[in-house]
Protein backbone atom coordinates (compact mmCIF):
# COMPACT_ATOMS: atom_id res chain seq x y z
CA UNK A 1 0.00 0.00 0.00
CA UNK A 2 1.14 3.55 -0.72
CA UNK A 3 0.89 6.27 1.87
CA UNK A 4 1.35 9.91 1.01
CA UNK A 5 3.24 11.77 3.73
CA UNK A 6 4.73 14.22 1.25
CA UNK A 7 1.81 16.28 -0.05
CA UNK A 8 1.24 19.01 2.52
CA UNK A 9 -2.28 19.10 3.97
CA UNK A 10 -3.49 22.65 4.69
CA UNK A 11 -4.45 22.82 8.36
CA UNK A 12 -5.12 26.53 8.78
CA UNK A 13 -8.69 27.20 9.76
CA UNK A 14 -9.12 23.88 11.57
CA UNK A 15 -8.41 25.60 14.92
CA UNK A 16 -5.16 23.67 15.01
CA UNK A 17 -2.96 24.62 17.98
CA UNK A 18 0.12 24.16 15.83
CA UNK A 19 -1.07 26.29 12.90
CA UNK A 20 -3.85 28.56 14.14
CA UNK A 21 -2.17 28.98 17.54
CA UNK A 22 0.97 30.56 16.05
CA UNK A 23 -0.12 34.11 16.80
CA UNK A 24 -0.82 33.26 20.43
CA UNK A 25 2.45 31.41 21.01
CA UNK A 26 4.93 33.25 18.79
CA UNK A 27 3.16 36.60 18.37
CA UNK A 28 3.28 36.08 14.61
CA UNK A 29 1.49 33.98 12.02
CA UNK A 30 4.21 34.45 9.48
CA UNK A 31 6.26 31.36 10.29
CA UNK A 32 6.44 27.66 9.55
CA UNK A 33 5.07 25.85 12.60
CA UNK A 34 7.46 23.14 13.78
CA UNK A 35 6.64 23.20 17.45
CA UNK A 36 3.88 21.43 19.45
CA UNK A 37 4.10 17.64 19.11
CA UNK A 38 1.44 16.82 16.61
CA UNK A 39 2.19 15.87 13.05
CA UNK A 40 0.75 17.20 9.80
CA UNK A 41 0.13 13.71 8.39
CA UNK A 42 -3.27 12.24 7.55
CA UNK A 43 -4.12 9.44 9.98
CA UNK A 44 -4.42 5.81 8.81
CA UNK A 45 -7.53 5.46 6.69
CA UNK A 46 -8.99 2.92 9.10
CA UNK A 47 -9.01 5.58 11.81
CA UNK A 48 -10.89 8.10 9.66
CA UNK A 49 -13.34 5.39 8.65
CA UNK A 50 -14.00 4.38 12.25
CA UNK A 51 -14.58 7.98 13.35
CA UNK A 52 -16.90 8.66 10.40
CA UNK A 53 -18.84 5.49 11.02
CA UNK A 54 -19.33 6.50 14.63
CA UNK A 55 -20.30 10.04 13.60
CA UNK A 56 -23.03 8.60 11.39
CA UNK A 57 -24.94 7.71 14.54
CA UNK A 58 -26.53 10.94 15.77
CA UNK A 59 -26.24 10.38 19.52
CA UNK A 60 -22.93 11.06 21.25
CA UNK A 61 -23.51 9.92 24.80
CA UNK A 62 -21.14 8.70 27.50
CA UNK A 63 -19.46 5.66 26.07
CA UNK A 64 -17.97 2.45 27.42
CA UNK A 65 -14.58 1.06 26.48
CA UNK A 66 -15.36 -2.34 24.99
CA UNK A 67 -13.48 -5.58 25.56
CA UNK A 68 -12.42 -5.35 21.98
CA UNK A 69 -10.70 -1.99 22.61
CA UNK A 70 -8.65 -3.46 25.45
CA UNK A 71 -7.77 -6.44 23.28
CA UNK A 72 -6.52 -4.14 20.53
CA UNK A 73 -3.99 -2.57 22.90
CA UNK A 74 -2.98 -5.94 24.35
CA UNK A 75 -2.39 -7.30 20.86
CA UNK A 76 -0.37 -4.23 19.81
CA UNK A 77 1.84 -4.42 22.88
CA UNK A 78 2.40 -8.12 22.28
CA UNK A 79 3.11 -7.86 18.55
CA UNK A 80 5.19 -4.68 18.50
CA UNK A 81 6.86 -4.68 21.89
CA UNK A 82 6.86 -8.32 22.99
CA UNK A 83 5.19 -7.23 26.20
CA UNK A 84 2.23 -9.27 27.45
CA UNK A 85 -0.19 -6.98 29.20
CA UNK A 86 -3.07 -8.36 31.26
CA UNK A 87 -6.47 -6.82 30.78
CA UNK A 88 -6.75 -6.01 34.52
CA UNK A 89 -3.60 -3.91 34.40
CA UNK A 90 -5.03 -1.32 32.01
CA UNK A 91 -6.51 1.96 33.16
CA UNK A 92 -7.69 4.34 30.46
CA UNK A 93 -6.93 8.01 30.87
CA UNK A 94 -7.83 10.98 28.67
CA UNK A 95 -4.14 11.80 28.26
CA UNK A 96 -0.65 11.08 29.43
CA UNK A 97 -0.31 14.52 31.02
CA UNK A 98 -3.36 13.93 33.25
CA UNK A 99 -1.72 10.60 34.13
CA UNK A 100 1.48 12.36 35.19
CA UNK A 101 -0.58 14.51 37.54
CA UNK A 102 -2.51 11.50 38.81
CA UNK A 103 0.76 9.63 39.44
CA UNK A 104 2.17 12.53 41.46
CA UNK A 105 -1.00 12.57 43.58
CA UNK A 106 -1.15 8.78 43.91
CA UNK A 107 2.48 7.94 44.68
CA UNK A 108 4.04 10.94 46.41
CA UNK A 109 2.30 12.36 49.48
CA UNK A 110 1.99 16.16 49.46
CA UNK A 111 5.46 17.66 49.87
CA UNK A 112 7.25 14.40 48.95
CA UNK A 113 9.98 14.36 46.32
CA UNK A 114 9.51 13.45 42.66
CA UNK A 115 12.57 13.02 40.43
CA UNK A 116 12.51 14.49 36.95
CA UNK A 117 15.39 14.45 34.46
CA UNK A 118 15.73 17.69 32.46
CA UNK A 119 15.80 18.74 29.75
CA UNK A 120 12.41 17.07 29.53
CA UNK A 121 8.86 17.60 28.26
CA UNK A 122 7.78 20.50 30.46
CA UNK A 123 4.54 19.04 31.95
CA UNK A 124 6.85 16.72 33.92
CA UNK A 125 7.70 19.77 36.03
CA UNK A 126 4.20 21.18 36.33
CA UNK A 127 2.73 17.78 37.23
CA UNK A 128 4.96 17.90 40.31
CA UNK A 129 4.75 21.56 41.27
CA UNK A 130 1.02 22.02 40.57
CA UNK A 131 0.16 19.06 42.76
CA UNK A 132 2.31 20.56 45.51
CA UNK A 133 4.98 17.87 45.37
CA UNK A 134 8.70 18.61 45.60
CA UNK A 135 10.71 18.63 42.41
CA UNK A 136 14.08 16.85 42.57
CA UNK A 137 16.15 17.35 39.45
CA UNK A 138 18.56 14.86 37.99
CA UNK A 139 19.81 16.67 34.86
CA UNK A 140 20.86 14.49 31.93
CA UNK A 141 24.51 14.59 30.93
CA UNK A 142 25.61 15.65 27.49
CA UNK A 143 28.96 14.33 26.31
CA UNK A 144 30.18 14.24 22.72
CA UNK A 145 26.75 14.99 21.36
CA UNK A 146 25.06 12.18 23.28
CA UNK A 147 22.83 12.35 26.35
CA UNK A 148 23.00 9.92 29.23
CA UNK A 149 21.55 9.53 32.70
CA UNK A 150 23.76 10.57 35.60
CA UNK A 151 23.26 7.47 37.75
CA UNK A 152 25.43 8.60 40.64
CA UNK A 153 23.40 11.76 40.96
CA UNK A 154 20.16 9.81 40.47
CA UNK A 155 21.08 7.68 43.48
CA UNK A 156 21.67 10.85 45.52
CA UNK A 157 18.33 12.27 44.37
CA UNK A 158 16.59 9.06 45.37
CA UNK A 159 18.08 9.43 48.84
CA UNK A 160 16.47 12.87 49.28
CA UNK A 161 13.06 11.59 50.26
CA UNK A 162 11.95 10.85 46.70
CA UNK A 163 8.89 8.62 46.28
CA UNK A 164 8.46 8.74 42.51
CA UNK A 165 10.67 8.91 39.42
CA UNK A 166 9.18 10.23 36.22
CA UNK A 167 11.04 8.58 33.38
CA UNK A 168 10.61 9.60 29.76
CA UNK A 169 11.51 6.73 27.42
CA UNK A 170 12.02 7.53 24.55
CA UNK A 171 13.08 10.87 25.98
CA UNK A 172 11.43 14.02 24.64
CA UNK A 173 13.23 16.31 23.68
CA UNK A 174 16.70 14.71 23.43
CA UNK A 175 15.55 11.69 21.41
CA UNK A 176 17.31 9.02 23.43
CA UNK A 177 15.81 5.52 23.48
CA UNK A 178 17.29 4.31 26.75
CA UNK A 179 19.24 1.08 26.41
CA UNK A 180 18.74 -2.11 28.35
CA UNK A 181 21.76 -1.34 30.56
CA UNK A 182 20.57 2.15 31.31
CA UNK A 183 17.09 0.92 32.15
CA UNK A 184 18.53 -1.81 34.38
CA UNK A 185 20.49 0.83 36.29
CA UNK A 186 17.33 2.88 36.73
CA UNK A 187 15.50 -0.20 38.03
CA UNK A 188 18.31 -1.03 40.46
CA UNK A 189 18.27 2.45 41.95
CA UNK A 190 14.48 2.50 42.17
CA UNK A 191 14.54 -0.88 43.91
CA UNK A 192 17.13 0.21 46.46
CA UNK A 193 15.11 3.30 47.35
CA UNK A 194 11.63 1.87 46.97
CA UNK A 195 10.69 4.37 44.28
CA UNK A 196 7.66 4.07 42.06
CA UNK A 197 8.53 4.74 38.40
CA UNK A 198 6.09 6.44 36.08
CA UNK A 199 7.46 5.41 32.71
CA UNK A 200 6.11 7.71 30.02
CA UNK A 201 6.48 5.61 26.86
CA UNK A 202 4.16 7.64 24.64
CA UNK A 203 6.79 7.80 21.87
CA UNK A 204 7.57 4.05 22.03
CA UNK A 205 6.42 3.27 18.49
CA UNK A 206 8.47 6.04 16.88
CA UNK A 207 11.87 4.39 16.89
CA UNK A 208 14.55 4.84 14.24
CA UNK A 209 16.44 1.89 12.71
CA UNK A 210 19.25 0.68 14.93
CA UNK A 211 17.55 1.60 18.20
CA UNK A 212 15.27 -0.68 20.18
CA UNK A 213 12.68 0.46 22.67
CA UNK A 214 12.46 -1.78 25.70
CA UNK A 215 9.32 -1.45 27.81
CA UNK A 216 10.55 -0.87 31.34
CA UNK A 217 7.90 -3.10 32.88
CA UNK A 218 8.82 -5.94 30.54
CA UNK A 219 12.47 -5.63 31.56
CA UNK A 220 11.53 -5.55 35.23
CA UNK A 221 9.77 -8.90 34.73
CA UNK A 222 6.93 -8.72 37.19
CA UNK A 223 8.32 -6.13 39.55
CA UNK A 224 5.48 -4.20 41.09
CA UNK A 225 6.64 -0.59 41.18
CA UNK A 226 6.24 0.48 37.59
CA UNK A 227 3.42 2.34 35.95
CA UNK A 228 3.66 2.64 32.17
CA UNK A 229 1.90 5.30 30.11
CA UNK A 230 1.26 4.57 26.43
CA UNK A 231 -1.06 6.03 23.81
CA UNK A 232 -1.85 5.85 20.11
CA UNK A 233 -1.77 9.66 19.98
CA UNK A 234 1.81 10.29 18.82
CA UNK A 235 2.10 7.02 16.90
CA UNK A 236 -0.96 7.59 14.72
CA UNK A 237 -1.24 11.37 14.96
CA UNK A 238 -4.49 11.52 16.93
CA UNK A 239 -3.45 13.61 19.96
CA UNK A 240 -6.45 15.92 19.59
CA UNK A 241 -8.81 13.02 20.28
CA UNK A 242 -7.40 12.47 23.75
CA UNK A 243 -7.14 8.88 24.96
CA UNK A 244 -4.26 6.98 26.52
CA UNK A 245 -3.67 3.97 28.70
CA UNK A 246 -1.79 3.24 31.88
CA UNK A 247 -0.40 -0.24 32.39
CA UNK A 248 -0.34 -0.95 36.09
CA UNK A 249 0.36 -4.51 37.27
CA UNK A 250 0.29 -3.66 40.97
CA UNK A 251 -3.33 -3.68 42.30
CA UNK A 252 -2.45 -1.21 45.09
CA UNK A 253 -1.15 1.20 42.52
CA UNK A 254 -4.27 0.78 40.41
CA UNK A 255 -6.39 1.65 43.41
CA UNK A 256 -4.29 4.73 44.18
CA UNK A 257 -4.46 5.91 40.58
CA UNK A 258 -8.21 5.32 40.31
CA UNK A 259 -8.68 7.42 43.44
CA UNK A 260 -6.59 10.21 41.94
CA UNK A 261 -8.62 10.12 38.70
CA UNK A 262 -11.85 10.19 40.71
CA UNK A 263 -10.59 13.17 42.68
CA UNK A 264 -10.03 14.99 39.41
CA UNK A 265 -13.25 13.64 37.84
CA UNK A 266 -11.31 12.42 34.87
CA UNK A 267 -12.95 9.76 32.75
CA UNK A 268 -12.33 8.41 29.29
CA UNK A 269 -15.64 8.13 27.49
CA UNK A 270 -15.28 10.12 24.27
CA UNK A 271 -17.00 8.03 21.56
CA UNK A 272 -14.62 9.24 18.84
CA UNK A 273 -11.38 8.69 20.71
CA UNK A 274 -12.47 5.18 21.70
CA UNK A 275 -13.15 4.04 18.13
CA UNK A 276 -10.02 5.79 16.81
CA UNK A 277 -7.86 4.11 19.48
CA UNK A 278 -9.06 0.65 18.52
CA UNK A 279 -8.92 1.16 14.75
CA UNK A 280 -5.38 2.55 14.99
CA UNK A 281 -4.07 -0.38 17.01
CA UNK A 282 -5.88 -2.97 14.93
CA UNK A 283 -5.20 -1.61 11.47
CA UNK A 284 -2.46 1.02 11.66
CA UNK A 285 0.64 -1.21 11.53
CA UNK A 286 1.41 -0.84 7.85
CA UNK A 287 0.87 2.91 7.93
CA UNK A 288 3.30 3.16 10.86
CA UNK A 289 5.96 1.16 9.02
CA UNK A 290 5.73 3.54 6.08
CA UNK A 291 5.79 6.56 8.38
CA UNK A 292 8.98 5.36 10.06
CA UNK A 293 10.71 5.05 6.69
CA UNK A 294 9.61 8.58 5.82
CA UNK A 295 10.66 10.06 9.18
CA UNK A 296 14.04 8.34 8.97
CA UNK A 297 14.67 9.95 5.59
CA UNK A 298 13.65 13.34 6.94
CA UNK A 299 15.84 13.00 10.02
CA UNK A 300 18.82 12.03 7.87
CA UNK A 301 18.14 14.87 5.49
CA UNK A 302 18.15 17.39 8.36
CA UNK A 303 21.42 15.96 9.71
CA UNK A 304 23.12 16.18 6.32
CA UNK A 305 21.73 19.63 5.55
CA UNK A 306 22.89 21.07 8.87
CA UNK A 307 26.34 19.51 8.57
CA UNK A 308 26.91 20.85 5.09
CA UNK A 309 25.05 24.20 5.12
CA UNK A 310 24.58 25.32 8.74
CA UNK A 311 27.46 23.71 10.67
CA UNK A 312 26.93 26.02 13.63
CA UNK A 313 23.69 24.17 14.37
CA UNK A 314 24.23 20.58 15.35
CA UNK A 315 21.65 17.83 15.34
CA UNK A 316 21.65 15.65 18.44
CA UNK A 317 21.18 12.35 16.64
CA UNK A 318 17.76 11.09 17.74
CA UNK A 319 17.04 7.40 18.20
CA UNK A 320 13.31 7.98 18.42
CA UNK A 321 10.43 10.53 18.27
CA UNK A 322 9.83 13.06 15.49
CA UNK A 323 11.21 15.83 17.66
CA UNK A 324 14.73 16.92 16.81
CA UNK A 325 16.97 18.58 19.39
CA UNK A 326 19.14 21.19 17.76
CA UNK A 327 22.25 22.44 19.50
CA UNK A 328 22.38 26.14 18.58
CA UNK A 329 24.95 27.21 21.15
CA UNK A 330 27.51 28.11 18.50
CA UNK A 331 25.18 30.78 17.20
CA UNK A 332 26.27 32.60 20.33
CA UNK A 333 22.94 34.10 21.31
CA UNK A 334 21.21 34.15 24.66
CA UNK A 335 17.83 32.43 24.91
CA UNK A 336 15.80 35.56 24.25
CA UNK A 337 17.88 36.41 21.17
CA UNK A 338 17.68 32.83 19.95
CA UNK A 339 13.91 32.76 20.23
CA UNK A 340 13.53 36.12 18.47
CA UNK A 341 16.01 35.07 15.79
CA UNK A 342 14.02 31.99 14.82
CA UNK A 343 10.65 33.76 14.98
CA UNK A 344 11.52 37.00 13.21
CA UNK A 345 14.57 36.31 11.05
CA UNK A 346 14.23 32.65 10.11
CA UNK A 347 10.44 32.62 10.45
CA UNK A 348 10.43 29.06 11.72
CA UNK A 349 8.40 28.35 14.83
CA UNK A 350 10.18 25.90 17.13
CA UNK A 351 10.08 25.32 20.89
CA UNK A 352 12.91 27.12 22.66
CA UNK A 353 15.05 24.61 24.54
CA UNK A 354 14.87 26.68 27.71
CA UNK A 355 11.24 25.61 28.28
CA UNK A 356 12.47 22.04 28.85
CA UNK A 357 14.34 23.11 31.98
CA UNK A 358 17.95 22.88 33.06
CA UNK A 359 20.30 22.11 30.19
CA UNK A 360 17.82 23.34 27.57
CA UNK A 361 19.29 26.81 27.06
CA UNK A 362 20.92 27.28 23.65
CA UNK A 363 18.86 24.49 22.08
CA UNK A 364 15.71 24.45 19.94
CA UNK A 365 13.24 21.60 19.41
CA UNK A 366 12.20 21.06 15.82
CA UNK A 367 9.13 18.95 15.00
CA UNK A 368 9.74 17.07 11.72
CA UNK A 369 6.34 15.38 11.74
CA UNK A 370 5.46 17.08 8.49
CA UNK A 371 6.10 16.95 4.76
CA UNK A 372 9.73 16.84 3.75
CA UNK A 373 8.95 19.88 1.59
CA UNK A 374 8.11 21.88 4.72
CA UNK A 375 11.27 20.66 6.45
CA UNK A 376 13.39 21.70 3.44
CA UNK A 377 11.79 25.11 3.36
CA UNK A 378 12.42 25.54 7.10
CA UNK A 379 16.08 24.61 6.75
CA UNK A 380 16.55 26.99 3.86
CA UNK A 381 14.99 29.79 5.87
CA UNK A 382 17.28 29.02 8.79
CA UNK A 383 20.35 28.88 6.55
CA UNK A 384 19.57 32.29 5.04
CA UNK A 385 18.94 33.80 8.46
CA UNK A 386 22.20 32.40 9.86
CA UNK A 387 24.12 33.66 6.84
CA UNK A 388 22.48 37.06 7.33
CA UNK A 389 23.70 37.21 10.93
CA UNK A 390 21.88 38.17 14.12
CA UNK A 391 21.38 41.82 13.09
C1 LIG B 1 6.71 12.63 26.66
C2 LIG B 1 5.32 13.11 26.42
N1 LIG B 1 4.34 12.78 27.29
C3 LIG B 1 3.06 13.18 27.11
C4 LIG B 1 2.71 13.96 26.02
C5 LIG B 1 1.30 14.44 25.84
O1 LIG B 1 0.41 13.47 26.16
P1 LIG B 1 -1.15 13.71 26.12
O2 LIG B 1 -1.47 14.56 24.93
O3 LIG B 1 -1.71 12.32 26.04
O4 LIG B 1 -1.52 14.38 27.42
C6 LIG B 1 3.70 14.33 25.11
C7 LIG B 1 3.36 15.20 23.96
O5 LIG B 1 4.20 15.80 23.36
C8 LIG B 1 5.03 13.90 25.31
O6 LIG B 1 6.00 14.21 24.46
Image: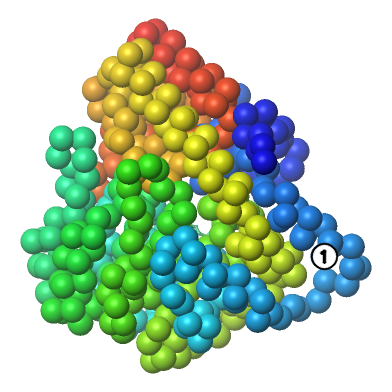
Q: In x, y percent, where is residue 46?
A: 72, 55
Q: Can I make out residue 133 in this image?
A: no
Q: Please name the residue that numbered disc 1 is placed on.
A: 54
Q: Classify 19 as above or below 264.
A: above
Which one is nearer the viewer's eye here, 359 or 3?
Answer: 3
Q: Which color mode does the image show?
A: rainbow
For the point 38% across and 50% down, the residue is: 172
Which residue sits at x=28%, y=70%? 219
Q: Secondary structure at mark 1?
A: helix
Relative depth, front residue between 157 and 271: 271
Residue 133 position, x and y percent, is 32, 73
Left or right: 30, with 56 as reference point: left
| Structural crowding at the residue carrying mark 1, measured as other residues with C-alpha within 10 Å and reported as few (<14), some (14–19) or many (≥20) | some
Image quadrant containing the N terminus = top right
Between 365 and 8, the one lying in front of the other is 8
Does 303 sit left or right of 158 as displayed? right
Q: Quadrant of residue 336?
A: top left
Q: Residue furthest top?
A: 388
Q: Residue at x 27, y 75 (%)?
A: 220
Residue 383 visible to the viewer: yes
Q: Position of residue 108 (x, y in %)?
A: 31, 80
* Image: 35 above or below 376: below
Residue 271 location (% of width, % of height):
75, 70
Q: Quadrant of residue 373?
A: top right
* Total tally of numbered discs in the picture: 1
Of 144 and 28, nearer the camera is 144
**What residue is drawn where x is 23% and y is 60%?**
180
Determine whether 334 is above or below 284 in the image: above
Q: Quadrant of the C terminus?
A: top left
Amino acid sequence: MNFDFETPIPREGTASVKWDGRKGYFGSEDLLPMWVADADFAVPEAVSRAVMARAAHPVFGYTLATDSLYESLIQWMHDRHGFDVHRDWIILSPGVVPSLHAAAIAFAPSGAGVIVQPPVYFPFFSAVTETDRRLILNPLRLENGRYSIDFEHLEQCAGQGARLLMLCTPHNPVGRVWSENELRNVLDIARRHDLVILSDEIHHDLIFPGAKHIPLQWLAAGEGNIVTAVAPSKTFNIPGLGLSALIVPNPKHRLALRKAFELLHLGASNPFSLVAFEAAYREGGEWLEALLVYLTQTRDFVGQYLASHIPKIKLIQPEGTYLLWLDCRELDMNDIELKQFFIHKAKVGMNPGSVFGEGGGGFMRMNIGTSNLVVKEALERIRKAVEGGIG
